[in-house]
Amino acid sequence: MLLLSIETTCDETAAAVIRDDLHVVSSVVSSQDALHQRYKGVVPEIAARAHVERILPVIAETLRKANITLADLSAIAVATTPGLAGSLLVGLAAAKALSLATGKPLIAINHLHAHVYACRLAAQQEVFPCVGFIVSGGHTNLYRCAGPCEFEYLGGTIDDAAGEAFDKVAAMLGLPYPGGPAISRIAQQGNPQAFAFPRSYWHDDSQLQFSFSGLKTAVRYAIAGPGKPLPEQQLEPQLQANLAASFQTAVVESLVDKCAAALRITQLPRLCVGGGVAANALFRERLTQEMQRCRKQLFFAPPELCTDNAVMGAIAWEKFRAGQFETLSADIRPGLDRG
Ligand code: KG4
Ligand code: ZN
């Protein structure tokens, strides 16, 4: 059996055809990075309009690559929460229209659950129960995951998401959007100890929380002191690399510290990590070392499934098997931040 998965929660228009044994038959991601680059962040109205233009061509291309027609599908799945309201509506409207036209059941996906499920796809083995960690542009959340769709919120960021901090610091350093890949690239030439940036709630197991706004301010003050404007001209390359490396290490050490704390607190045997920041090479390396040290199993989403895509919508097969279908009055839930 085959299902069509649709993803439009933020600024990626994506679709995939996935078989019931989780084999990915086809996948298309149309990135809007170029549209948002000049604003150094996602502009919701631009994102929604771009989804409207792209959704039908992306779905058509996905079906063409799979060499199938709508008649070959057994279900239509779409991410309905959380995300940008205008973006979510485009995906849901498309999915409802296809469901109505074909008579195939409609399945709603939680985008955060899907990010963790990307680990299940790569592992090709059972990964639940686990601690699930979603570290992306919109979220830095830890969950106790009893099963693929049973998430209990353990803690998260009290201000910026880790990816958002990468994007904002990249903008301060004069680097392009999205900031994560740009910072990790130039950090390779930098000294991670050049600046002693703060790590919030460091080594404090009583607080499964993150905070990146103080770190962001510390980077800003390292470039230009309090009350001073950021310099107009490009920073000197070695200074830029040192700032990037010191910032990246501070974020990564905070993330690794809280993953270890979540495993200690829950006593769960494994950790599954997804979301755009999980593509970060230093984070992958440091977390792998830490999980070996505390003898826990670690599953990362593969790098190509860390940033938004429709393949992780394979989680819809879990709902299909459980008979969890939606009616045509299904709605979006943009602000369900805790999943
Ligand atoms: O999961 P995602 O595609 O979208 C959201 O649901 O937010 O994540 C995008 C975020 C951006 O903030 C981007 O800067 C960050 O993931 N990111 C990275 C890396 N690649 C993407 N952050 C750090 N290092 C990376 N290599
Ligand atoms: Zn995402």
Image (tube, rainbow, N blue to C red):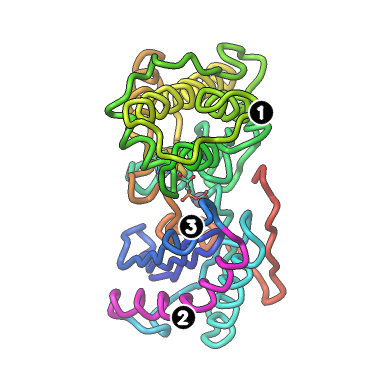
* Residue drawn at 39 percent across, 81 percent down: 60
- Identified by mark 1, the residue type is Gly
Near mark 1 (Cα within 10 A), the count class, few <14, some 14-19 or many ≥20, is: few
Q: Are marks 3 and 2 in contact (CB under 8 Å)?
A: no
Provide the residue designation for mark 2: 56
Q: Which residue is mark 3?
A: 38
The stretch drawn in magenta includes residue 61: yes
Q: In front: 85, or 263?
A: 85
Rounded to the nearest whole Å, what is the CA distance between mark 3 and mark 2?
26 Å
Name which residue lies at 45% across and 37% down: 173
Q: Position of residue 219 (x, y in %)?
A: 52, 26
Mark 3 or mark 2, whichever is nearer to me: 3
| Mark 1, secondary structure of its residue | loop
Looking at the rendering, the stretch of residues picked out in magenta corresponds to: 43-67
Instruction: From the image, state whether disc 3 or disc 1 is nearer to you.
Output: 1
Earlier residue among tags 3 and 2:
3
Magenta span has 238? Answer: no
Which one is nearer the viewer's eye here, 270 or 216? Answer: 216
In the picture of the structure, the residue carrying the numbered disc 1 is 227
In the rendered image, residue 217, in percent from the top left (x then y), is placed at 60, 28
In percent of the image, x 33 and y 50: which residue is there?
A: 304
Label 3: state its secondary structure. Answer: helix
Q: Earlier in the sequence, mark 1 or mark 2?
A: 2
Gap in angstroms between the C-alphas marked 3 and 1: 25 Å
The residue positioned 28% from the left and 75% from the top of the image is: 65
